Amino acid sequence: MSNITRIKRFLIDEFLPDVTPEQLADDHDLLSDGVIDSLGVLKLIAWVEDHFALPVDDTDLDPNNFRSVAAIDAFITERRAQAGATVGG
Amino acid sequence: MTTRSPAPGQSATGTAPATGQSADGTDPAPLALPDAFTAHARTRPDAPALLWHERTLSYGELAHLAEAERRRLAALDLAPGEPVGVLAVKSPEAIALVLACLTERRPFLLPSPQLAPALLAALFAQAGARRVLAPLGQDAPALPAPAQAAPVPTLAAGTSFMLTTSGSTDLPKIVPLGQSAVDRFTAWAHDTFDLGPGRVVASYAPLNFDLALLDVWATLAAGGTCLLIDPAHALNARHLLTQLTRHRPHVMQAVPLAWALLTQSAGAGALDSVEHAAFTGDAIDARTLAALPALLPNAALYNIYGCTETNDSFLHRLDRLDAAALPVPIGTPLPGVRTLLAAADGTLVHGPGSGELYVSTPFQAAGYLDRSRDTGRFTTQPEGAGHGRRWFRTGDLVTRDERGLLHLTGRSDFQVKVRGVAVNTAEVERVLLTHPEVREAAVAAAPDPLTGKRLHAAVQRAPGSALNTLTLREHLARNLPRAAVPEKLAIHDEPLAKTPTGKVDRKAVLPTP
């Protein structure tokens, strides 16, 4: 299962019970229309940390990192690459 | 018949509308409603007065029923001016009982018979009505004795109808209306819509609702025929349509809910008899509004604005070609109606601008029966509003445009703070209703320890619509600030819960505690 699919599944389970994965566009702005509020962002970060075993530090808490499915996916990919680089280096 | 509209931008200091009436719209004094009815019964006894299911009652037959009720009323041991309670479901018999009260100049409280017995008992006690009457042939209601005997209120001389507010708050307020105020109103209604002999006027609202003053009472004063829609079948679109196509009314006023039912179930041109079609009492949804011109090919369409306390205050005649534009203006004041806009700091807004709407109408109550509840509602303020005039503070927030037309923007009591941002829940409802797949919408605020208030919204989507919370949220976010997008959004296929007067019940949107 791709990251995108897993992110969508989480978002739908938590915030959008009446929506299908096809209806949730990758670039849908989740913050501007209140799908996720500030508490939701915290929930999402906890899930990312837990699910992808990625520590999210305070500097990553920019809401723009969590604005859309694509943004979350990009954030995860980037953090993994950094983590990999750190481990490898 | 054309609609009379005063010059736009009418204000407290404006000139009297060019109608030949005096500045306060009080003369010439029309015939009192019971006398006008009796005159019709005497001169045209065979003319139809009421249409009720398969029955037609002539003015003569209705006068006969009313006379039997009048004798019963006269035989009661009542002090002069002592009010009675009338507990009646809409029917010819109920109308006869009210006519008897009017003829006897006996004030009467006419609450919704659907209220809980304990609430009814409290209302009758508050009105000082020792005797509660059901129409002849209907079962007398059993009401509990009120917990404590209320002091008997002093009613103003000439009080006739006592209606209740729809009770979106707790105990409904009692609104006593003077007979002369009712008569000025029925004269306006007849003058505007022609309710006289040969005309059929559909009455959709329950009898206790203030809309009946136009549908039923103005029609009987003018000599027309009132098509009574049975509230027990009012949500049955097929029944409604059958009654309307069989009896072919010329005039119909109803809440948006009724028009929504009709536009959904009737074909184009189905109500071609209607010349004047008015919606009132609630915000209309975009789809229903857009469908009205086809449903009513020969009708002038109106938005009527009024409160139980003041009766109708504004009328807006819609341009048929432009009927889909939301929100519909509430329009211009009726003849003799004065308006004020007060900004949040209490200063008056002159010309274009926004503020809370105050009105003073020739049809209004002097105050609530319980005068302690007048505070902040009936007032001689604000400053500069002129001496001696009594104003009703509507609680509605409006904007006056360059043409002098007023537009409803929300309710001052629907103003809440979400994350420190002022949000008007009525505005959120309005935006929800502009979505083409939304039929009904309700928004309410629940207290929240974190954000101040948390908004809950519920909508009914159109049949076959695949509307989901995501697309609805996008629609909201395009039209509202972020704080005004409700946190909880529920989409239903079924109609939303309604109050007894047919308005969407906002409280039902909130989670049960």
Image (cartoon, helix red, strand yellow):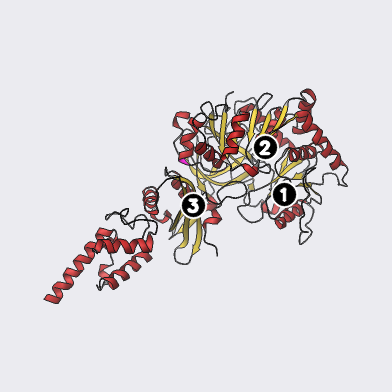
Q: Secondary structure at mark 1?
A: loop
Residue B294: within the magenta?
no
Establish whether labels 1 and 3 are both on one chain.
yes
Q: Which residue is mark 2?
A: B213
Q: Which residue is mark 1?
A: B369
Residue drawn 39% across and 59% down?
A17
The quadrant of the rendering that contains the C terminus of chain B is bottom right
> Between marks 1 and 2, how big is the CA–CA gap?
19 Å
> Between marks 1 and 3, how big is the CA–CA gap?
30 Å
Dot placed on the residue nearer the N-terminal end, 1 or 3: 1
Amino acid type at mark 2: Leu
Residues B139 and B256: in front is: B139
In the displayed structure, B292 sits above or below A89; it is above
Q: Secondary structure at mark 3?
A: helix
Predominant SS along the magenta part: loop
Amino acid type at mark 1: Leu
Q: Is residue B338 visible?
A: no
Q: Position of residue A61 (x, y in %)?
A: 28, 67
The quadrant of the rendering that contains the N terminus of chain B is top right
- The magenta-colored residue range is B281-286
Q: Which residue is mark 3?
A: B425
Q: Position of residue B470 (x, y in %)?
A: 37, 53
Q: Residues within 10 Å of mark 1 (few under 14, many from 20)?
A: many
Q: Is residue A13 visible?
A: yes
Is residue B403 found left or right of B216 in the rendered image? left
